[in-house]
Amino acid sequence: MEVLTADNVMLGLPSEERFEAIKRVGKKLVENGYVEEQYIEGMIKREEDISTYIGNGVAIPHAVSEYVKYIKGSGIVIAQYPQGVDFGAGKAYLVIGIAGKGDEHMNILSKIAIVCSEIDNVKKLVSAKDPEEVINTIEREVL
C-alpha cells in the first residue's frame, strides 16, 4: 500500500468548518484503506484537546494515541483549500490527514512538519493544480 497516491489528494475544495475538514480527510483515509472508521473519532478528539494547526497555513490532523489501533497501514491525505479553513490558531490552506502504522506515525508527522516549515513548499502545495505536483513536492522531501 502506497503512503501517498493521486487518489489521496483533494484540490480546490471550498472552505468549510475545521471539524468538517478533519472529517473529510479522515473519511478519505478510511475510503482508501489506511484506517478504520473509528480513527476519525480520534482525530476529532485530538483537535478538541489541542489544535493541529502547525503554522504556515497548514494543519495536520491525526488521532490521539488510543486510536492508533485503528490504523491498518500508513497513509497521507492532503486537502487543499484555496480560501482556507479557520483552525482557531490560524487559517489552514492545507489540511494533511496522517495515519502511521507503528513507529511510522511520529516519523511521518515530523517529516511533513519539516516540509511545511518551508514556506516555498507550502506555496507550491497550495497553488498546485494537479495531484502529481503535490506528490512530487512531498515525496522529494519526505518519502
Image (cartoon, rainbow, N blue to C red):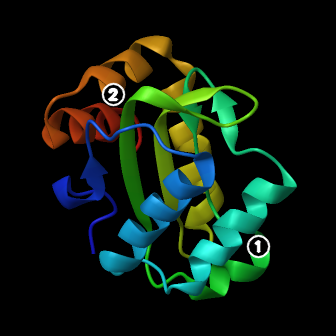
Q: Is residue 112 above or below residue 40?
A: above
The crowding category of the residue bearing disc 1, from other C-alpha atoms within 10 Å (few below 14, some 14 to 19, many at least 20), is few
Residue identifier under label 2: 125
16 relative to 98, above or below: above
- Residue 58 appearing in the image: yes
Q: Amino acid at mark 2?
A: Leu
Q: Earlier in the sequence, mark 1 or mark 2?
A: 1
Q: Label 1, on which residue? A: 65
Q: Residue furthest top?
A: 120
Q: Amino acid at mark 1?
A: Ser
Q: Residue at x 39, y 56 (%)?
A: 77
Q: Is residue 19 left or right of residue 30?
A: right
Place residue 133 in its image quadrant: top left
Q: Which one is in front, 78 or 14?
A: 14
Secondary structure, mark 2, is: helix
Q: Position of residue 96 (x, y in %)?
A: 48, 47
Q: Which mark is residue 33?
A: none
Is label 1 in a helix, a strand or a loop? helix
Which residue occupies 24% across, 42% down?
135
Compared to 84, does 24 lie above or below?
A: below
